[in-house]
Image (cartoon, grey):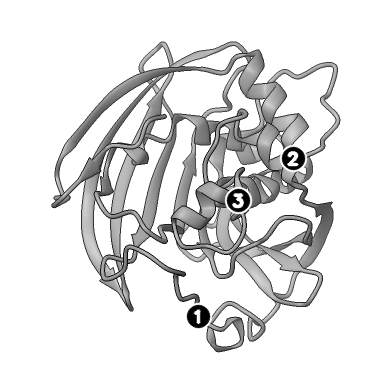
Amino acid sequence: MAITKFADPQAGVDLGSATVVIDETALSDYFEGLELERPDDLATAPSMVAANADLSTRMHYANDFGNLWLRQEWDFRKPLKPGGSYEASAKSIDIYERRDRSVILTETVVKDEAGDVAVAMRHHQSFVLYQSEGHVTLRDPSKKEGAKSYALPEGEAFGPLLRTISLEMCGSFFHGDRNYHTDKQASEELGFTDVVVGGKMTMSLIGELLDQRFGDAWKSSGKLLIKFANIVWPNETVAVKGVLQGVNEDDPERRNISCWVEKDNGVIAVVAEGSLRL
């Protein structure tokens, strides 16, 4: 989806709507991009295909130099169907500061043809407004919470899902589009030294692990807060791991879960925590 740039983004702006179809292209790019074998009897779509309906790019700062995903919140209520048509609508929720970055928080709600909410998501996109050229400064992973200091959660382990993410995988996953997740020159224009493996891609590896472990229970009741701690670069190997934990304090019918993406040098790239109804 095209990026709409604002000189002065504001909270409370209606970002419009779009019809999103879970078509063959969406499914093929997902499975090929993540190097997954597609099931012959695909009754429900992978949960993270819902990210195709995210309308957050309808509000970016005019200066999008060094922009990165900060967080993504998910609320899954109904599994998406292959070939299904959905209506996505979005609005800006908040504009806030976090360390040296300005963050736009948007919410996208995806409804099925009956008008029921299938998925709701909140996207936190961060921007470096004081810089527009050169190389963006990235924090030392060892000094970031959620990095090497991440305390591995206890519980019933599942996974890992292992992938060495190639540039070819990035190209397939992002539909062949030229952007800083697929093309080095485009990435350098935004201040990065190499292609940035998209947060949507590492997030989808977490979603795939949860799909494999919990199936439609995850796709119909999962809630997840994903935090992006460190960039994944092309040709790095990652291990996606998860833990099923105890009963959720707020809802005894739900179980807590934690997931993380760990690079082969030990750095934690992504952490996630949430719950689902089993």
Tell me the mark number nearer the camera, choosing from 3 and 2.
3
Q: Amino acid at mark 2?
A: Met
Sequence-first disc among 3 and 2: 2
Residue 38 shown left or right of residue 255 in the figure: right
Task: Look at the image and tell me in which quarter the C terminus lies.
Answer: top right
Residue 174 in view: yes
| Residue marked by disc 1 | 139
Q: Amino acid at mark 3?
A: Lys
Task: Look at the image and tell me in which quarter the N terminus lies.
Answer: top left
- Name the image quarter holding residue 133: bottom left
In space, the residues marked 2 and 1 are separated at their CA atoms by: 26 Å
Instruction: Judge whether 269 appears above or below 142 on screen.
Output: above
Task: Residue 115 in the image: state x and y as whole percent.
Answer: 35, 17
Q: Label 2: state its secondary structure.
A: helix
Do callouts 3 and 2 mark residues in contact (Cβ within 8 Å)?
A: no
| Residue marked by disc 3 | 184
